[in-house]
Amino acid sequence: MIAIAAVDDNWGIGYDNELLYRLPEDMKHFKKLTTDNIVVVGKNTYNSIGPLPNRINVVLSREEQTFEYDNVIFSTIDTLGEKLEELKKIYPEAKVYLIGGEKAYYNLIDYCDTAIITHIHSDKHANRFFPNLNRRKNWKFENSTFSEVSSKDNLVYDIITYNQNEDSVKAL
């Protein structure tokens, strides 16, 4: 699984169920990576953004829900591994992206082998955070794009890839 997020200097991702930043370039990058793939999303985040088109949306919930509709499947964390295995049989080329929110990131980051982080060089007041991968010894910086400036608000950002040590990745 691949975690994907946009964070500020303090690894903040949101405030009161809203993203801290909506950079057009980052949104295009996110869409390009996740389209035609599987996204895993927490229920609060799902409720704020709705189902993402052209993706299979796996929504984490506390209770198992048996109904499915359109491109949305509900799952508990306990059944997530089984559901993703079933989906990979149907969509063998699809990648699985963990797209938030905070609880989903903290509960599932150890099951991810890669994290693609848009680091926005700014500090906004946040009350939702992504795990700081620089402070986790099992994660290592892999590479980064050159700093770019967003067309909106002239914010400087980098896209950084982190990898978790292979022997540290937990199986679902």
Image (tube, rainbow, N blue to C red):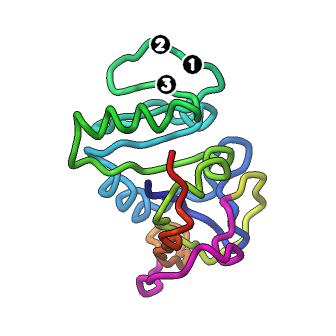
**On the image, numbered disc 2 is attached to which residue?**
66
Residue drawn at x 44%, y 70% as measured from the top left = 151
**Sequence-first disc among 1 and 3:** 1
Gap in angstroms between the C-alphas marked 1 and 3: 7 Å
Image-based side of 120 in relation to 136, left or right: left
Q: Residue 26 versus residue 138: which sits nearer the camera?
A: 138
Tags 2 and 3 touching, CB below 8 Å: no
- Residue type, mark 2 in image: Thr
The 10 Å Cα crowd at callout 1, few under 14, some 14 to 19, many 20 or more, is few
Q: Residue 73 versus residue 51: which sits nearer the camera?
A: 73
Quadrant position of residue 53: top left
- Residue type, mark 3 in image: Phe
Q: Residue 124 versus residue 33: which sits nearer the camera?
A: 33
Count of marks placed on residues: 3
- Residue type, mark 1 in image: Glu
Region of the chain picked out in magenta, as a range? 130-149
| Label 1 secondary element | loop
Tags 1 and 2 touching, CB below 8 Å: yes
Gap in angstroms between the C-alphas marked 1 and 2: 6 Å
Q: Is residue 133 magenta?
A: yes
| Label 2 secondary element | loop
**On the image, numbered disc 3 is attached to which residue?**
74
**Residue 16 at x, y percent in the picture:** 73, 43
Q: Is residue 123 magenta?
A: no
Above or below — where is 123 with respect to 18? below
| Dot label at residue 64 | 1
